Image (cartoon, helix red, strand yellow):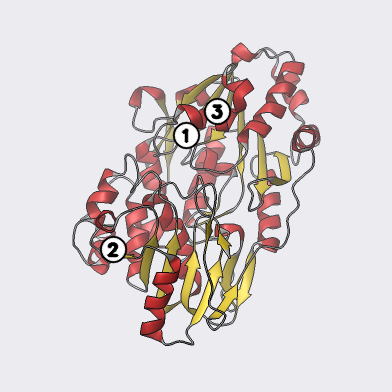
Amino acid sequence: MKLDYGKEGIDITVDPEWNITVFKPSEQKPIENPIQKINESINNPIGSLNLKEIVKKKGKIESVCIIASDATRPVPSHLILEALIAELNIYGIADKKITILIATGLHRTSHEDELERILGENLKNRIKVVDHIATNDKSLINIGVIGDNHPILINKLYYKADLKILTGYVEPHFFFGFAGGRKSVIPGIAGAETIQYNHSAENIASSSARFGIYKENPLHKHSIEASKKVRADFIINVCINEEHKIIKVASGDFEKAHEKLVDFQLKHIFREINNRYDIVICGNGGYPLDLNLYQAVKSMTIGEMAVKKGGTIISVNECADGVGIGQDKFKELIFSGMKPKQIYEKILNKEIVVPDQWEIQILARILTKADIYVISKLNEDEIGNIGLKYATTVEEAIKKCLREYGSNASILILPNGPQILPLLKDRKTND
């Protein structure tokens, strides 16, 4: 059996006597001509004028800013951008007026080879590209306040552009409910203070800050409210299959087009389970989502959805970038020697306030409920000392678990990351 892992996948040998259930997504055929489909979507938008009419209505356009997902996302942005920029050129907007802003949030900036993957070889040499840097105050503008008088800090380049366009992809997100749409703005191009308010310990602790929970999710609600103040003229979002090929496109109004794809995901992604499992094996869906241990926490939350209390999650992520470039505080805390419950409580009590606290907060939460084995390129001395367990192979981890739980322990394997998600029968995704 093959699991998504890095660029090539990883094969595991399954003993026929093991009590295994495997959830694979139903076949999702890619769109045969995605660029043509994107063009059709741009010209037949949801809830807005088409892009040509928007451009005409604006009159003279000197600057266009297009938001694109960063290198940790598997969306084939080069196809969206190729179709979009060709349309803009037809409308009389020259390449020199267009800037692509990479929505890094608080992630690291892009490597050269990653920019080629995001833009495609042709566009990389034609269009200006800028990485958003959330900690660079000079690149930000304060456009007002939200919630408990917290500022909305947004990338100045985007905010001041004559034409603002969002691109991205929609899939379930481990604490935002769903990726895409408003998430391109906050956290994508927001300042660090705005991101940290949105991703506060209180919001992350909410039972509504989970995979597939949308309307009642506090992070979603804050991001929508703030994004309306920032504004987007147009959006192009897609859904992708386990091979990261486009299967669905929606364009137009940044809320309505996004919600169209959310509805599609809700119908196709979740698989109901009657009972939790002793062992859950899952990853992030391979490269680039499994680049580091920091990102691997997302897959552990998939396991959390289906594992019994006291059970084991086997996290299968390559982690070619190690713990995570630039994730110094995350690394510091996984080597703190504290108990997971202690870390979790200190974060909620604001005794621990660090950049990206949400990732360590979620990891600590899961570790209070279940054991986690890490299968990756990391060495044992690189996974910290707060409770993560080490095994060299998936098979080794399974055998260790079976010695603890018994030979008939229930095992759930999710080979394709968040392409299919287990949903306990009595839990509802959106209520």
Callout 2 secondary element: helix
Q: Amino acid at mark 2?
A: Tyr
Mark 2 and mark 3 residues within 8 Å of each other at the beta carbon: no
Residue 174: x and y in percent read 49, 57
Q: Is residue 121 above or below residue 225?
A: above
**Residue occupied by mark 3:** 116
Q: Earlier in the sequence, mark 2 or mark 3?
A: 3
Judging depth in this view, the residue of 224 and 213 nearest the camera is 213
Q: Amino acid at mark 1?
A: Ile
Is residue 163 shown to the viewer in this render?
A: no
Q: Is residue 243 above or below residue 11?
A: above
Please give the label number shown on residue 189: 1
Mark 3 nearby-residue class (10 Å; few <14, some 14–19, many ≥20):
some
Q: Which residue is mark 2?
A: 344
Nearer the observer, 140 or 79: 79
Q: Nearer the viewer, mark 2 or mark 3?
A: 3
* CA gap, disc 3 and disc 1: 20 Å
